[in-house]
Amino acid sequence: QHMAYLASLLMPVYIVLPAVVSRWTSSSTPLDLAFRAYPWRTLLVPTTAVLVALTPSNMESIPWGFYSMLLLVSFLGAVGSQCMFVSQMAFFATVSDTAMGGTYMTLLNTLANLGGMWPATLTFKLVDATTCTADSCFFKSDGFYLVSVACFAYGVVWYMLGSGYGKRLQHLKPSD
């Protein structure tokens, strides 16, 4: 019940933040904001894992300090997510051919949505596949923490190897 209240508290963030961050994406390099937000979002992975580990086992009396931390992590995740989303949309608007109207931008947005939806399904499958709590397990593990470590490592490596390409991509002319 309290979790639903926390989600409701973040709704204004999702509504107002795109308008607030759009001033940083209206330049010729709209992806710069996404590349600044990405490391912070990556750091939220281990932060969330620690928060999950600290979750009280007794759900009847969860301390308000825990809810405050949960709200803060959720707020930071929402800010990072919205910064990256607005940055991506601004980049699509920059590279879209105006002669085609909104068709090209719709195609780019559809591809981005498809690319952004399947990782969650894969992550849930990996958590299930790496969780083993039975007595017959050679190595007992909670897949959530294993997948969190793997996703954090992947995020760091991707940023180190892929961000340079993305930064160069936004400097190309549409004719290139």
Image (cartoon, rainbow, N blue to C red):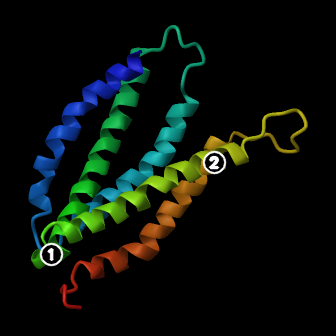
* Residue furthest to the right: 136
Q: Is residue 163 placed above or below 86 in the rendered structure?
A: below
Farthest residue to the top: give it.
Answer: 60
Residue at position x 54%, y 55% in the image: 151
| Mark pair 1, 2: CA separation | 39 Å
The answer to which quarter of the image holds residue 112 is bottom left
Pick the quarter of the image with the C terminus. bottom left
Q: Earlier in the sequence, mark 1 or mark 2?
A: 1
Return the mark for residue 166.
none
Q: Residues within 10 Å of mark 1 (few under 14, many from 20)?
A: few
Going by the numbered disc 1, the residue's amino acid type is Met
- Residue 148 in view of the camera: no
At 12% from the left edge and 55% from the top edge, which residue is drawn? 22
Q: Is residue 62 left or right of residue 110?
A: right
Q: In the shown orientation, is residue 4 left or right of residue 175?
A: right
Residue that numbered label 2 is attached to: 125
- Front-most of residues 84 and 98: 98
Label 1 close to label 2 by CB (< 8 Å):
no
The mark closer to the camera, 1 or 2, is 1
Question: How many numbered discs?
Answer: 2
- Residue 156 at x, y percent in the picture: 48, 63
Residue 74 higher or lower than 19, as above or below: above
Residue 115: give x, y in percent of width and height: 42, 62
Name the element at disc 2. Answer: helix
Tag on residue 100? 1
Question: Which quarter of the figure is the N terminus placed in?
Answer: top left
* Tag 1 secondary structure: helix
Which residue is found at the position 39% from the left and 17% from the top? 2
Horizontal side, residue 136 vs residue 161: left or right: right
The kind of residue on which mark 2 rests is Lys
